[in-house]
């Protein structure tokens, strides 16, 4: 994801075809403004590889070090997020506040929940209407979340 403050993140350097050239964790002088945002899909050997890592100068195991193991073996790909995709950091108190404020504003203005797993599963056809109704029946019927899911079932359009 392209950010204005890449020194706070794991920075990804790409070649002209968006193949990864390097990944560096929180560099003083970033090679790009693209950062790894923490959306990873790893093969089954990930735990074995992670156990080989040593702690960084910050006394932490770094996800960038794990990603570099895959990069070294030519097994790492990244998909740059383009315009129209929004990602927000929540790794500092300030950014967590900003993220929660943004979520609140969007949800209130659109009257839609962001990342509602039941809604996503239902709209994508991963669960049937009957399964959705079973999930709703198992919830506190007075909760705003349950009322939201009931509204999703009642809607007959696919605008979003």
Image (cartoon, rainbow, N blue to C red):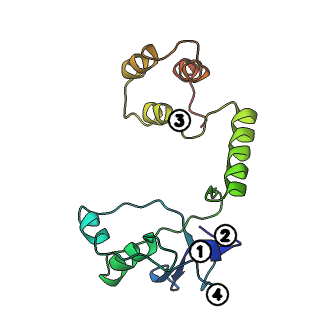
CA–CA distance in space, label 1 to label 2: 6 Å
Q: CA distance from mark 2 to mark 4?
A: 14 Å
Q: Which residue is mark 3?
A: 116
Q: How many neighbours does mark 4 have within 10 angstroms: few (below 14), some (14-19), or many (20 or more)?
A: few
At which x and y percent is residue 8? 63, 72
Q: Residue at x 73, y 33 (%)?
A: 108
137 to the left or right of 32 = left
Instruction: State left or right for residue 20 relative to residue 31.
Output: left
Specify whether residue 50 is in view: yes
Q: Foreground mark, 4 or 1?
A: 4
Q: Secondary structure at mark 2?
A: loop
> Is residue 85 in view from this perspective?
no
Q: Nearer the viewer, residue 151 or 147?
A: 147
Spot occupied by residue 56 in the image (x, y as percentages of width and height) = 46, 78
Q: Residues within 10 Å of mark 1 (few under 14, many from 20)?
A: many
Disc 1 to disc 2: CB gap under 8 Å: yes
Name the residue at 42% across, 70% down.
Answer: 61
Q: Which residue is mark 1?
A: 34
């Amino acid at each position: 994801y392209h950010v204005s403050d890449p020194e706070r993140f794991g920075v990804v350097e790409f070649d002209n075809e968006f193949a990864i050239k390097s990944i560096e964790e929180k560099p003083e002088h970033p090679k790009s403004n693209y950062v790894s945002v923490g959306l990873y899909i790893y093969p089954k050997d990930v735990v074995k590889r992670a156990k080989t890592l040593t702690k960084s100068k910050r006394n932490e195991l770094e996800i960038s070090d794990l990603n570099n193991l895959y990069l070294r073996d030519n097994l790492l790909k990244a998909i740059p997020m383009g315009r129209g995709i929004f990602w927000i950091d929540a790794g500092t108190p300030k950014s967590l506040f900003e993220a929660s404020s943004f979520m609140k504003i969007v949800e209130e203005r659109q009257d839609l929940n962001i990342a509602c797993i039941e809604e996503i599963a239902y709209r994508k056809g991963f669960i049937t209407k009957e399964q959705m109704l079973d999930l709703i029946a198992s919830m506190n019927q007075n909760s705003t979340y349950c009322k939201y899911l009931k509204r999703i079932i009642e809607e007959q359009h696919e605008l979003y």
